Image (cartoon, helix red, strand yellow):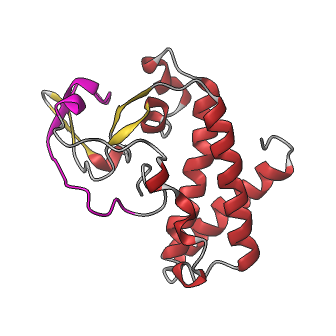
Amino acid sequence: MGVCQPCTRGRGQRRAHGARGRGAKPRTSSARRFSLRAPEFLGEDRSMPQFAPNPMALPALAHDDREFLLSIYSSLRIALDRLPVRLVPILGDAHLGNVFITSDGALWNDFEDACLGPREWDIGFLSAPELTAFEPLNRDALVELGYLRSLCVSVWCWALADIPEKRDAAEDHLGYLREWASSGRLA
């Protein structure tokens, strides 16, 4: 699931394989050598509401759930726009399935969603102890991006809802977001 184009794959993006990093930490110097102009994270041309006008885009998603996810997306955009985040080259879809650990360190692949974005997006899947290797972090951005990641996973899984495991994941993430929204912590 791409982040620069949340919940859809990066259409028209070229793939560049083989950027090297040390350990499991993405190296921005490798991303700087990426010769294509990197799109911005959540840029105007890459926003999630592409699924909104067409209910057939996610036929398994109920209308009320669609409206709820759009409202969550809007709230998260506002919250993220208020945060002081620095845009750096990021993989955009960093997870352990996109890294090969070699004797020379990590070899990242799948640059389809590479973009300029907050580095907290690429490391948000790590556990709290693993995050300490990336200090200093914008903890507020890490939290908001975690909810955005959950929203993206939900939408991505709704697109594959005919697969029982994906539908379960879609419903779990939707429930998580509803719980968060009802807690009063929503921006």
Total labels drawn: 0
Which quarter of the figure has residue 51? bottom right
- Identify which residue is drawn at 56% across, 66% down: 155
Which quarter of the figure has residue 101? top left
Q: Tell which of 97 and 14 is nearer to you.
A: 14
Magenta extent: 9-33
- Whole-percent x, y for residue 182 in the image: 85, 52
- Identify which residue is drawn at 86% across, 44% down: 184
Which quarter of the figure has residue 9? bottom left
- Residue 75's place in the image compared with 152, above or below, is above
- Kindly give the residue lying farthest to the front in the view shown: 44
- Whole-percent x, y for residue 43 in the image: 46, 47
Q: Any magenta on residue 22?
A: yes
Q: For the N terminus, give its image quadrant.
A: bottom left
Q: For the C terminus, give its image quadrant.
A: top right
Q: Tell which of 37 and 111 is nearer to you.
A: 37
- Residue 114's place in the image compared with 123, above or below, is below
- Residue 118's place in the image compared with 12, above or below, is above
Q: Is residue 54 left or right of residue 62?
A: left
Q: Any magenta on residue 58?
A: no
Name the main secondary structure of what is drawn in magenta.
loop
- Residue 168's place in the image compared with 40, above or below, is below
- Whole-percent x, y for residue 150 in the image: 59, 53
- Identify which residue is drawn at 41% across, 41% down: 40
- Kindly give the residue lying farthest to the top in the view shown: 136
Q: Is residue 52 left or right of residue 91?
A: right
- Identify which residue is drawn at 73% across, 61% down: 175
- Whole-percent x, y for residue 7 in the image: 48, 61
Q: Is residue 64 left or right of residue 151?
A: right
